[in-house]
């Protein structure tokens, strides 16, 4: 891996470790939000029997822990770049009484597993952040057994994900935030339909399918939305840290007005959309 990719990886590791406390705090809300994509991934890989499943970018443990609960005679290897996120995964496994798992901090671009090790691979919202998506896909295919399935999810475009654009769009309108270079890791890097499908096919997967899956962020109030986004959203926190107090308050006020206009009252349930892509190894 070249020096630039190494640097991106190290920055991401530090960022996810730093925000792990926010993810722990908001786990119930975020897991409810991401559940439909996890369910779609599970339908793709169809866990059963004594399967050995790899969950990449496991974060706080899903969908890997749900998969483990479905295959008591099988096993799930949960991996993530962030050690601190995996601490939360361990805690969740203990609280749910799930023991047929292993947990390992590692990088998807250098998976520490032998060829043809796993019956299936799940990866919920990892690809957008992988420094080298092609290499990540190749590594997944390498460690997957012939006939095994890979399933992943990535966010659809900004026009379908107001939960991101309400905050980031307001920040960008108010502040001079430099645009990341094209193709740089980020929320909407994989939002072009067919992009991950093509990467999967180039990595050698067959029968590749892509479906769109809708969900809702059930915040209830705008204040809950704002508090959550400013405690788990690294780009939002980074941008606001560069603003003075007056600018922070202006952005907060505008975000509140924007969300309340679209979702009046105390029933803030923000629509969102993602792609779930699934492929099989020959």
Image: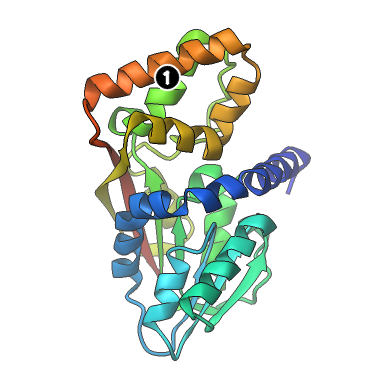
Q: Total number of numbered labels?
A: 1
The answer to which of 48 and 206 lies nearer the viewer is 48
Residue highlighted by disc 1 = 169
The answer to which of 273 and 117 lies nearer the viewer is 273
Q: Position of residue 273 (x, y in %)?
A: 29, 42
Q: Is residue 280 visible?
A: yes
The answer to which of 32 and 25 lies nearer the viewer is 25
The answer to which of 87 and 120 lies nearer the viewer is 87
Q: Residue 270 is drawn in which quadrant?
A: top left
64 over 101 or under it: above or below:
above
46 over 163 or under it: above or below:
below
Q: Is residue 212 left or right of residue 243?
A: left
Q: Position of residue 24 (x, y in %)?
A: 54, 53
Q: Write the residue at 47% across / 38% down.
A: 228
> Callout 1: helix, strand or loop?
helix
93 over 156 or under it: above or below:
below
Q: Write the residue at 47% across / 48% down.
A: 26
What quarter of the picture does the C terminus occupy?
Answer: bottom left
What's the image's color scheme?
A: rainbow
Q: Position of residue 95 (x, y in %)?
A: 51, 73
Judged from this view, the residue extending furthest toward the right is: 3
Q: Is residue 121 visible?
A: no
Count residues near mark 1 (Cα–Cα under 10 Å), then give few for <14, some for 14-19, many for 20+: some
Q: Write the residue at 68% across / 59% down.
A: 83
92 over 176 or under it: above or below:
below
Q: Position of residue 164 (x, y in %)?
A: 40, 31
Q: Is residue 273 left or right of residue 101?
A: left
Q: Residue 39 is drawn in which quadrant?
A: bottom left
Q: Write the residue at 42% across / 19% down.
A: 169
């Amino acid at each position: 891996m070249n020096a630039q990719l190494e640097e991106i990886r190290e920055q991401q590791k530090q960022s996810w470790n730093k925000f792990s406390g926010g993810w722990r705090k908001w786990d119930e809300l975020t897991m409810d939000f991401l559940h439909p994509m996890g369910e779609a991934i599970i339908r793709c890989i169809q866990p059963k029997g004594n399967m050995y499943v790899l969950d990449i970018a496991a974060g706080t443990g899903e969908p890997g822990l749900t998969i483990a609960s479905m295959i008591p005679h099988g096993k799930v290897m949960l991996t993530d770049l962030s050690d601190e996120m995996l601490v939360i995964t361990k805690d969740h496994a203990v609280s749910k009484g799930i023991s047929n798992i292993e947990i390992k901090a590692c990088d998807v671009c250098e998976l520490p597993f032998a060829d043809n090790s796993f019956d299936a691979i799940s990866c919920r919202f990892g690809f957008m952040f992988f420094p080298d998506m092609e290499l990540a896909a190749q590594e997944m295919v390498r460690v997957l057994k012939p006939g095994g399935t890979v399933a992943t999810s990535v966010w659809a475009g900004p026009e379908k994900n107001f939960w991101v654009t309400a905050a980031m769009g307001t920040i960008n309108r108010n502040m001079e935030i430099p645009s990341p270079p094209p193709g740089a890791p980020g929320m909407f890097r994989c939002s072009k339909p067919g992009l991950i499908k093509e990467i999967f096919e180039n990595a050698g997967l067959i029968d590749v399918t892509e479906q769109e899956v809708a969900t809702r962020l059930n915040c209830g109030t705008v204040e809950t939305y704002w508090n959550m986004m400013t405690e788990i959203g690294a780009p939002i926190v980074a941008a606001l840290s560069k603003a003075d107090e007056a600018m922070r308050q202006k952005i907060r006020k505008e975000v509140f007005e924007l969300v309340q206009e679209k979702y009046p009252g105390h029933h803030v349930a923000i629509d969102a959309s993602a792609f779930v892509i699934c492929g099989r190894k020959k």
